[in-house]
Image: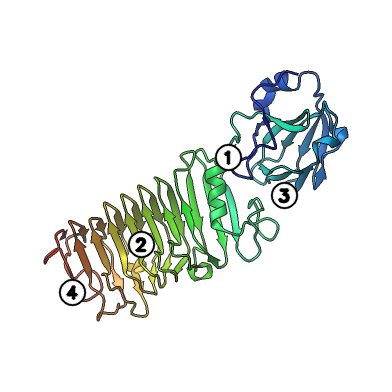
Amino acid sequence: MAIVRTVPLNLPIVDPYRLPTRDFAGFLSQVQQVANNSWDNTQTPVNGNYTLKAGDIGNTVALGGNTFYQLTIGPVANYDPQFLCLIVNIDLMPGGRAKKIVVTGGPTVLLWPGQSFFLFRVANAWYTAPSDPVPLRWNVPANVTLNVNASVGNDNNDGLATGAGNALATPQRAADIISGLWDINTRTVTIQVTGAVTGSIAVNSPWVGSGTVQLLGDTTTPPNTTWTNSTGNPNVIVQGAGRLQVSGFKLVNTGGGDGCAAITFGTLALVGKMEFGAVGNYHMEANQNGQISYFASAPYVISGGGNAHYGAAAAGAILISGFTGANTISITGTPAFPAGFALANQGSIAAPSNAYSGSVNNTTTPQWQILNGGAIYTGGVGAGYFPGNAALNVGGTTAGGGFIT
């Protein structure tokens, strides 16, 4: 049997949920190389948990049913020395589910709808084809939602349905699946979070594909998805030229970190309703060429304090605009921002055409600080635009460099 570019399944795999797979149609040319005359395409239909049998030699194991279940591959010694079969997830999108492939003594991987691979024995090891490279990404065929529920979810699930046994437990696992295992093409991928959530999410690089990834909580009542983080990291951070849209959360950070941040050319777009509770640092931080944008399509609420509400540094940029009328920014509970409601330290903040209702703690909160050439644009209103105590302002029209317009 002539084999080209194959890898034994007992070799380390970077992510335990990756497998060398490809859509069934893409295998046709490799069938001739790998299967030769050993694969007769006899169908073994599977719709639930299944252990690969010695009698499946030469067969196509067709995993269907639109449910998430496990295919177990036993020890290689239990199978014929010439064992070969094709394993394919025949589910379609929308509605399809991944299948968990568990190799006894080897890796556990996820096979996404439409993916497939040849499994065959050489000596005393399992091999797969294709493997060019390990792993191949799932070419996402339609808009898709990954569901997250901290109370009933599990990061060993596939996330393609809601509830116990289906949903993931953390937003981070959802982001890791998208960044590490998928090519999103031009699709919209939604990470839908239900209920309270803890910890943080980091998007560390661009997605593969030009599509959109949106992280959604309760977009009608954000406190229903209160996000409390005690790790010291931002609740949400986008960096390394990554990109993410976020909506529908109340952000609380008890570990000294930001509510959300964009750094090192990361792009974070806030969309729709949000609420900013108490944080240890900034509600929004743009740093090292990171960018945060927030254009009004619904009001947002400030219910807790921090060092600053807006914080831009080291060529970071924040753009907040259009929050007037029904979309006025509401401040409750007189929160304090000792570094300034708006802080621009070698960074820029553009916040024109906004209206603020409610009050901050004027004893400790400057309206703004502008340091080291930072800049704030208010649409021509200038000093007095932001909530806070003008007597505490630093920079711009006084010392410290930079300007406010």
Label 3 or label 1, whichever comes before in sequence order: 3
Residue type, label 1: Val
Mark 1 vs 2: CB contact within 8 A: no
Q: Quadrant of residue 382?
A: bottom left
Q: How is the image coloured?
A: rainbow
**Structural crowding at the residue carrying mark 1, measured as other residues with C-alpha within 10 Å and reported as few (<14), some (14–19) or many (≥20):** many
Mark 1 vs 4: CB contact within 8 A: no
Q: Which mark is residue 68?
A: 3
Mark 3 vs mark 2, CA separation in Å = 38 Å
Residue type, label 2: Met
Label 3 or label 4, whichever comes before in sequence order: 3
**Residue 120 appears in the rendering:** yes
**Structural crowding at the residue carrying mark 2, measured as other residues with C-alpha within 10 Å and reported as few (<14), some (14–19) or many (≥20):** many
**Residue 324 appears in the rendering:** no
Q: Which mark is residue 390?
A: 4
Look at mark 2 in the image and give the residue it sits on. Answer: 284
The residue at the far left in this view is 398
Label 1 or label 2, whichever comes before in sequence order: 1
Residue type, label 4: Ala
Label 3 or label 2, whichever comes before in sequence order: 3
Say what secondary structure mark 2 lies in: strand
Image location of residue 287, percent across then percent down:
32, 54
Say what secondary structure mark 4 lies in: helix
Residue positioned 39% across, 54% down in the render: 269
Residue positioned 49% across, 71% down in the render: 223
Mark 4 vs mark 2, CA separation in Å = 21 Å
Residue type, label 3: Phe
Look at mark 1 in the image and give the residue it sits on. Answer: 140
